[in-house]
Amino acid sequence: MAVKEKEAVKKTAPKSKVGEIKKETKKATTKKVASISKLRIKVTAYEHKVLDTSVKQIMDTAFKFDAKIRGPIPLPTAFKKYTVNRSTFIFKDAREQFEIRIHKRLIDILSPSQKVIEALTNLNLPAGVNIDVKLM
């Protein structure tokens, strides 16, 4: 029965039309990928002042090469809290709490040129600033 069903499907859909549909969809997706390409930069740091100066430095280098920029977009600050006993063996009720704040910014560079990418890779940013770059 399965063989008969396959033959019925082949008869109803001619190969030429199926091939044309596949070619059209492939062409459409390649055009979209070429026009949407962007560089997404996520910058994180513990100190917001250092983060803002490094973001400004990234934006200045992108502006030098006439790149279109979206951002900087401030993302929610992440809080990591640690609770520690004040003494080693006694007074368990006495505790201290510490927190680390991780500040984040997001920058999108729309249709970056090769010069922009090369300039961004050669940037010297301060210590404590982490950068994640994604090509989309």
Image: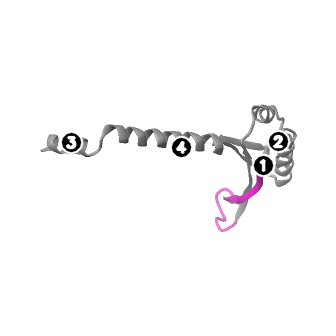
Number of marks in the rendered image: 4
For the C terminus, the image quarter is top right
Q: Give the SS element for disc 3.
A: helix
Q: CA distance from mark 4 to mark 1?
A: 26 Å
Q: CA distance from mark 3 to mark 4?
A: 29 Å
Amino acid type of the residue tagged 4 in the rendering: Ala
For the N terminus, the image quarter is top left
Q: Are marks 2 and 3 in contact (CB under 8 Å)?
A: no
Q: Are marks 4 and 1 in contact (CB under 8 Å)?
A: no
- Nearer the N terminus, badge 2 or badge 3? 3
**Who is closer to the viewer here, 105 or 28?**
28
Circle 4: is it few (<14), some (14-19), or many (20+) Cα within 10 Å?
few
Q: Give the SS element for disc 2.
A: helix
Amino acid type of the residue tagged 3 in the rendering: Lys
* Residue assigned mark 3: 6
Circle 3: is it few (<14), some (14-19), or many (20+) Cα within 10 Å?
few
The circle on residue 62 is: 2
- Nearer the N terminus, badge 2 or badge 1? 2
Q: In this rendering, which labeled residue sits more in front, label 4 or label 2?
A: 4
Q: Are marks 4 and 2 in contact (CB under 8 Å)?
A: no
- Nearer the N terminus, badge 3 or badge 1? 3
* Residue assigned mark 4: 28
Q: Position of residue 85 (x, y in %)?
A: 67, 60
- Magenta span contains residue 7: no
Helix, strand or loop: magenta stretch:
strand
The circle on residue 69 is: 1
- For the point 82% across and 54% down, the residue is 48
